[in-house]
Amino acid sequence: MKEKVTAKKREAKIFFSLPFKNRTEDEVTADVKRMYKAFIKRYRNEFFDEECEVKFVTNWDYTAPADSKNARANQIGEAIKRMSECDIVLFHPDWKFAKGCEVEHLMCEIYKMPYINMEDI
């Protein structure tokens, strides 16, 4: 089990890995909210002290630079950077159908980053 993030840290971060392709901002936001609520209800006490403020992180707001040779590679690089700054990664039930999510999942497995597959949100 992952060591709890203590109140001394004041803030805990969760990275949300979910498909963006062919989805509206409202759909993505709704999924993030559902995943967040499900995580807090089921796992908060397992991972975080009550005093910690829990923040969520996604890659939705990132756009690769216009001069990027490979925008998708640039975007996944930014996602991995953001993931590395988080305490845990939550995977949307459809993560297996998105290449970026597959890469993020592989990174968690290779580098032993704590993650949860949110299969039943």
Image (spheres, grey):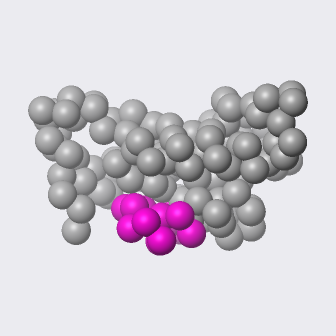
Q: Residue 107: x, y in percent?
A: 53, 64
User: Observer-nearest residue: 50 or 15?
Assistant: 15
The stretch in magenta equals 106-119
Q: Residue 74: x, y in percent?
A: 73, 43
Query: Is 7 placed above or below 21 here?
Result: above
Q: Is residue 92 visible?
A: no
Kindly identify the residue that appears in the image at 49 percent across and 47 percent down. Answer: 83
Q: Residue 12: x, y in percent?
A: 30, 38
Kindly identify the residue that appears in the image at 79 percent across and 48 percent down. Answer: 72
Kindly identify the residue that appears in the image at 20 percent across and 45 percent down. Answer: 5
User: Observer-nearest residue: 104 or 116?
Assistant: 104
State left or right for residue 64 relative to residue 96.
right
Q: Residue 36: x, y in percent?
A: 45, 45
Residue 56 part of the magenta segment? no
Looking at the rendering, which quadrant does residue 78 occupy?
top right
Which quadrant is the N terminus positioned in? Answer: bottom left
Looking at the rendering, which quadrant does residue 7 occupy?
top left
Query: Is 46 placed above or below 83 here?
Result: below
State left or right for residue 39 relative to residue 78.
left
